[in-house]
Image (cartoon, helix red, strand yellow):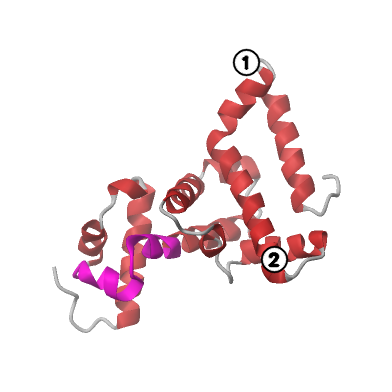
Amino acid sequence: MTERRGRSREGTEEALREAGYRLILERGYESISTRDVADHAGCNHGLITQYFGTKATLFTKVLHRLADEIGRAIAAGTPIPELNRLPIMNAYWRLLASLLSAGISPVEALASGTPTVEAMVQRASAITGRSFEDSRGFAASIILMIGGFHIFGPVFEQELTGPDGTEDATRTLQQAAWLILNGLTKPD
């Protein structure tokens, strides 16, 4: 399929990002081809290479959009248990893991300009006393730790506590993350 006539480059890029976003909510990164994305966007698949370079770069942009949506949900006061059940949350962590496996650096994956990431980088800079750029790696480590917990948490909880104490393990792990993210102060 060729690019739709009359669509600007920006419009085509947005259509490709939107198609990638829709597909990632439906299925895993590895099962999506550039042709799939282009077909859903209504354009030639060669435009992905022309505009983004690689599939991984396109999906890094999709990851940033997911992060923005999660940030908006947090800002709107969505409770964490409800937030964790949203399809965008699962898609975010799985896509992040896939992109890291594909060789994207954590610092690149966690984009500048994403409000949630920037807030964490600023907090990391305040905690560590390091430069903003040095703190980006620290913040990336924290985000990846949280992602690992989100994806593998049930396994860790069972290993830590056995079948009866999962709730206590979850609370302990959540408190540890809370302490790190909030400058080593206790939650209310």
* Whole-percent x, y for residue 26 in the image: 34, 47
Q: How many marks?
A: 2
- Could you give the CA–CA distance between mark 1 and mark 2, rounded to whole angstroms? 40 Å
Q: Which residue is mark 1?
A: 163
Residue 66 as seen in the image, left or right of residue 54: right
Q: Which of the two marks, 1 or 2, is nearer to us in this view? A: 2
Which amino acid type is shown beneath numbered disc 1? Pro
Q: Identify which amino acid the numbered label 2 is placed on.
A: Asp
Question: Which secondary structure lies at badge 1?
Answer: loop
Is residue 23 within the magenta segment?
A: no
Q: Nearer the viewer, residue 81 or 101?
A: 101
Which quadrant would residue 36 be assigned to in this image?
bottom left
Q: Residues within 10 Å of mark 1 (few under 14, many from 20)?
A: few
Residue linked to disc 2? 134
Q: Is residue 25 above or below residue 76?
A: above
In the displayed structure, would residue 146 be above or below residue 16?
above
Quadrant of the image containing the N terminus: bottom left
Q: Residue at x 25, y 72 (%)?
A: 47
Name which residue lies at 68% across and 31% down.
170
Residue range highlighted in magenta:
43-61
Residue 151: percent from the left, percent from the top?
53, 38
Q: Position of residue 121 (x, y in %)?
A: 69, 63
* Quadrant in which residue 188 is drawn: top right
131 w.r.t. 62: above or below = below
78 w.r.t. 81: above or below: below
Residue at image coords 58%, 67%: 114
Q: Secondary structure at mark 2?
A: helix
Residue 56 in the magenta stretch? The answer is yes
Q: Mark 1 vs mark 2: which is more N-terminal?
A: 2
